[in-house]
Amino acid sequence: MRVLLTGASGFVGRCAAAALREMGHSVVAVVNSGGRDADGEVLRVDLLSAGTAGRIAEAASADALLHLAWTTRHGAYWNDLANLSWLAATAELVAAVARRGTRRVCVVGTCFEYDWPVDGDCDEDVTPTASHTVYDAAKTACRLVLEQLARDMHLSLAWARLFHLYGPGEHPDRLVSSVCRALVAGRPARCSSGSGLRDFMDVRDAASALAHLVTGDVRGIVNVASGETVRIRDVAVTLGDLAGRPELVAVGELPDRPDEPPRITASTSRLNREVGFQPEHRLRDGLNDALTYWTKERDRHG
Amino acid sequence: MRVLLTGASGFVGRCAAAALREMGHSVVAVVNSGGRDADGEVLRVDLLSAGTAGRIAEAASADALLHLAWTTRHGAYWNDLANLSWLAATAELVAAVARRGTRRVCVVGTCFEYDWPVDGDCDEDVTPTASHTVYDAAKTACRLVLEQLARDMHLSLAWARLFHLYGPGEHPDRLVSSVCRALVAGRPARCSSGSGLRDFMDVRDAASALAHLVTGDVRGIVNVASGETVRIRDVAVTLGDLAGRPELVAVGELPDRPDEPPRITASTSRLNREVGFQPEHRLRDGLNDALTYWTKERDRHG
């Protein structure tokens, strides 16, 4: 299949391009004009500019679209109105590719769309949605609009809800990266109490799941998550063990955020059974790889 | 109060400006650069242009915003992607006025947001939403985003769901207008079987309801409707009676649309009790005024 991939130079996108190619698909990579490079066939454009969607759709003439591009400025994107521009641009792009014959579309949503149950996993069919930030409200809004477009334009649409990701290329200020960076620098890794439960998935698994999803035919909402539930502090503690520096992990030294959700975990039976995808990296192995990545980064940059 | 009114030269907007002034409020009218004129303090802008929202908010410095502007091209707006641009522009505008101190916002939604019950009225709290077209999906999406902005920015937000409107200035191809035009021209008014039940409200009442709503403090979703349930064909039959030409009304001469909803009617207890608004025009009287309007239009244009 020929897959049009937006956000192709991003954290998830680079791994998704690799996963698609490994499966034997060809990738048309859309990257932001100011962004990083990408391998293979590349379209450098600004997705928020008028007319871009039509030009991409025509140039790519793809069988499927995997749309990852969105505003992702660390710390800022939660309440950024740019989320609305991305919503509009996403609808434009999906309609444009549909008009050019693309019949399969997969767009990423977020676990923040759910009204997280405190005593169980988020389930695609059962768990209600709730809005917590402009980001997830815009993602939910985008899904509603795309579901309507899919009905009108006879598109096969999958909406992949990503949970917590980590791995090579993650933003340096996020949990796994920041603990890794402290450990490889021999600095204390100061954490909050980290009592919340989460699902952490290696970005390479998430990307591979998305590659399977977009080239398959499962429609509707699909959680993209590992299915492993872990307490946040245990991620830091495991990293300390793996680094051989458990004493550097200082759990409880930062204050807890008052609004920290106690549990955001995923039912993965749709991903595992319907999509037929199983992750390859157990949490401990993936965290070890992240540590190796940040050790190399340290050695590279001195 | 000083009310910023968008869509001020439109079908609902002109009446809303009049209603607000009649209540003693001052109106800053936002009209499209290419659109019709409006009375009083006017800002001529293109709301879809970057930076417009901020400029309007600064220029208006209003206590409240009544946002009516949206894509409304007759027949085309149902599946127009311009709906998404209006969603984004609406969020920009609401955020911009909130930053400039506006604390009260009323935005219009639509009865098409509801999953219409066949055996009763649409109720703001009880009736679930459903998506029928890109237009209503975008309106629902807009509401979700604005609800989040309202929480984040401590705004008082009302979401007014308009039902079926008619009256002076209505698009000539819509039901009441087109039947009136046929009758005053002495031509047959050909209609479908018109078996569906609807709520028709005089635009002057709808505008007055919106003026009360935006200058009040009721938050959340409010149906703006007459509360009178009527069969669609009886609207045409009543117009024929009022015109003294009942023989011109040809019910059943046009085919029924296969997807015509059997019932779209409104619970109006929130509008009547919480907002404290009662419509002034009974359907028969409003239809008579519409007929008078189109008689004058005929005489004016020959």
Image: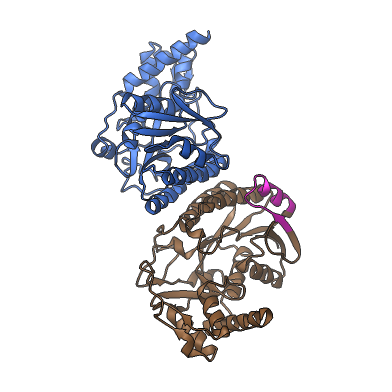
Chain colours: A blue, B brown
**Which quadrant of the rendered structure holds the N terminus of chain B?**
bottom right
Residue B206 in picture, x, y percent from top left:
57, 71
Q: Nearer the viewer, residue B160 or A127?
A: B160
User: Measuring 59% from the left and 47% from the top, which residue is drawn there?
Assistant: B153
Q: Is residue B58 magenta?
A: yes
Image quadrant assignment for residue A18: top left
User: Measuring 48% from the left and 16% from the top, which residue is drawn there?
Assistant: A182
User: Measuring 49% from the left and 45% from the top, which residue is drawn there?
Assistant: A92
Residue A83 in picture, x, y percent from top left:
53, 41
Work out whether B195 lies above or below A186. below
Image quadrant assignment for residue B285: bottom right
A152 horizontally vs A259: left or right: left
A26 horizontally vs B181: left or right: left
Q: Is residue B49 magenta?
A: yes
User: Measuring 56% from the left and 63% from the top, which residue is drawn there?
Assistant: B218
- Magenta segment: B43-59
> Is residue B294 in view?
yes
Give the mark count: 0
> Is residue A68 in view?
no
Residue A13 in picture, x, y percent from top left:
43, 29
**Which quadrant of the rendered structure holds the C terminus of chain B?**
bottom right
Q: Residue furthest left?
A: A273
Work out whether A253 lies above or below B215. above
Residue B204 in picture, x, y percent from top left:
61, 74
A121 horizontally vs A98: left or right: left
